[in-house]
Image: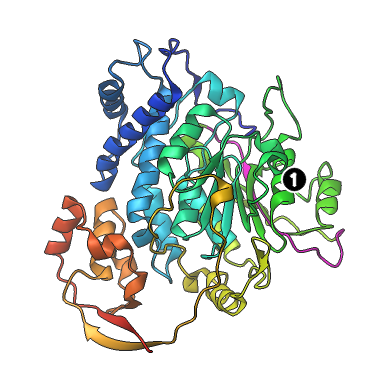
């Protein structure tokens, strides 16, 4: 990304002790697991905490060259991914309150320290990870469904990819930086993880991968093996990913604010792109959204469907500048539904009616939108992309329902526990006295795992009424 650091300084840290990248990635992963405990209990992670954790796991201090502060920031991002994997489904599961989910995610990210030091690699490759709240909004704009294959060409540490996983999609991740590539392999062992120059992802990526959704936050003006500024770097990444996108699919990109259909510099490029797709949405984002990641430069969210418009020269007008992430969430909630007839992996979708119904909720006003959090399936066995099994159409089975009272911990209990844990106002959740939900919509964590000690204590002290659940039963 073409971002000039604000209140961030280059880290003149000693040269790192040579180590195998796989071992180093494993240490960062273990550091993230340790830091996860603080996030689970709502405790802020300070510089002293990072120094203690990394010094213990790496066997030496940053002053001795065993690790750098860039490593420390990567470890906090690993912790956030693990936190979202564990609790993300519960946080995002309230169908009528995406604003509340966004507030909770913002609160969680406030527990990690601001990035204030830059490494040489992060400067050269313009590594600015996507803030979790922005990744959440981008995932809602993508409107992910179970059938989707989601490609992230510059996946970084997985802060965007985890929302695709929560959407129960199949992931194809790519990251050129060796250390981050190793971290992704540990975080997403059941997904395809490649290591190509994302500016040419369509040329290098395995031809069997045909994504229906593309998430991307590419470098804004940096190129692999290229010294100096590359003015069209972000466009190269976007164009190559769009070329790989399946017909009817959706691309959601975070770029520099200058990459706009309104710009005279890029207008002709967007018109050429609209010979094959439609730019649905474009809005600049105030630099404060990235402040905790060490910059205050404005960015832009662009949404493109790979469906050719009637008039390629008719470009969407920019929404302006979103002053905060809450405003951006409101704007993206007005996006039109995704096409229900696009192809999944080269075969016609049999789920058009389901997708049409889902879009009625997901892309309407934010107050009635469908959650992207869904129960996760068992991890797929890692293997080459070519060995992935072909998709099969879902078997439709008629369901009947039987109401029964639940006396165990309810979804309301879990939600209120999270609210107390991270300091959000509990009154925001009390819009209903009784919650009706399908038992299979509860994540596996709800059903089979005990919550963390802090959450369990909150739940025991809560005096919320029993909820009513709908228990499914199959008809022969």
Question: Which residue occupies the foreground of this view, 314 or 327?
Answer: 314
What is the chief secondary structure element of the magenta stretch? loop
Question: Which residue occupies the foreground of this view, 128 or 243?
Answer: 243
Q: Which residue is mark 1?
A: 239
Magenta extent? 295-313
Q: Is residue 168 left or right of residue 227?
A: left
Q: Is residue 415 left or right of residue 84?
A: left
Relative image position of residue 68 (x, y in whole percent): 41, 20
Residue drawn at the location 65% of the way across and 54% of the way down: 210
Question: Quick check: 168 above or below 125?
Answer: below
Relative image position of residue 396 (x, y in whole percent): 49, 81
Determine which quarter of the picture holds residue 358.
bottom right
- Magenta stretch containing residue 19, yes or no? no
Residue drawn at the location 35% of the way across and 72% of the way down: 440
Residue drawn at the location 70% of the way across and 64% of the way down: 248
Residue drawn at the location 41% of the way across and 42% of the way down: 187
Relative image position of residue 452 (x, y in whole percent): 20, 52
Q: Is residue 6 visible?
A: no
Q: Quadrant of the C terminus?
A: bottom left
Question: Which residue occupies the foreground of this view, 91 or 275?
Answer: 275
Determine which quarter of the picture holds residue 456.
bottom left
Relative image position of residue 357 (x, y in whole percent): 56, 79
């Amino acid at each position: 990304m073409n971002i000039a650091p604000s209140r961030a300084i280059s880290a003149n840290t000693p040269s790192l002790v040579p180590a195998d990248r796989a071992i180093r990635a494993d240490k960062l992963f273990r550091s993230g697991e340790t830091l996860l405990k603080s996030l689970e209990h709502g405790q802020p992670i300070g510089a002293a905490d990072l120094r203690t954790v990394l010094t213990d796991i790496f066997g030496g201090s940053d002053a001795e060259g065993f690790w750098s502060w860039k490593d420390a920031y990567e470890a906090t991002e690993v912790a956030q991914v693990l936190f979202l994997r564990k609790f993300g489904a519960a946080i995002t599961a309230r169908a009528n309150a995406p604003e509340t989910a966004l507030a909770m995610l913002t609160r969680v990210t406030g527990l990690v320290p601001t990035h204030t030091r830059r490494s040489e690699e992060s400067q050269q490759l313009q590594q600015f990870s996507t803030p979790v709240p922005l990744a959440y909004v981008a995932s809602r704009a993508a409107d992910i469904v179970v059938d989707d294959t989601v490609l992230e060409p510059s996946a970084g540490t997985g802060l965007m990819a985890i929302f695709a996983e929560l959407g129960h999609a199949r992931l194809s991740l790519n990251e050129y930086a060796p250390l981050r590539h190793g971290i992704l392999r540990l975080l997403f062992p059941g997904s395809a993880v490649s290591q190509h120059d994302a500016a040419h992802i369509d040329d290098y990526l395995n031809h069997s991968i045909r994504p229906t959704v593309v998430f991307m936050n590419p470098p804004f003006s940096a190129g692999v093996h290229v010294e100096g500024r590359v003015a069209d770097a972000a466009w190269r990444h976007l164009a190559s990913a769009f070329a790989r996108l399946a017909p009817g699919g959706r691309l959601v990109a975070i770029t520099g604010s200058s990459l706009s259909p309104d710009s005279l510099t890029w207008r002709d490029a967007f018109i050429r792109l609209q010979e094959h797709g439609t730019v649905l949405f474009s809005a600049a984002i105030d630099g404060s959204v990235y402040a905790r990641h060490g910059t205050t430069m404005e960015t832009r969210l662009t949404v493109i469907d790979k469906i050719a418009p009637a008039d390629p020269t008719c470009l969407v007008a920019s929404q302006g500048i979103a002053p905060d992430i809450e405003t951006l969430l409101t704007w993206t909630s007005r996006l039109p539904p995704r096409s229900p007839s696009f192809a999944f992996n080269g075969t016609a979708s049999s789920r058009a009616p389901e997708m049409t119904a889902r879009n009625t909720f997901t892309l309407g006003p934010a107050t009635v939108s469908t959650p992207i959090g869904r129960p996760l399936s068992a991890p797929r066995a890692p293997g080459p992309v070519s060995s992935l099994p072909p998709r099969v159409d879902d078997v439709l089975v008629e369901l009947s329902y039987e109401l029964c009272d639940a006396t165990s911990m309810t979804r309301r209990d879990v939600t209120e526990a999270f609210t107390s844990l991270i300091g959000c106002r509990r009154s925001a959740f009390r819009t209903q006295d009784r919650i009706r939900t399908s038992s299979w919509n509860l994540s596996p964590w709800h059903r089979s795992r005990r919550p963390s000690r802090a959450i369990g204590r909150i739940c025991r002290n809560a005096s919320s009424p029993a909820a009513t659940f709908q228990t499914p039963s199959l008809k022969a």
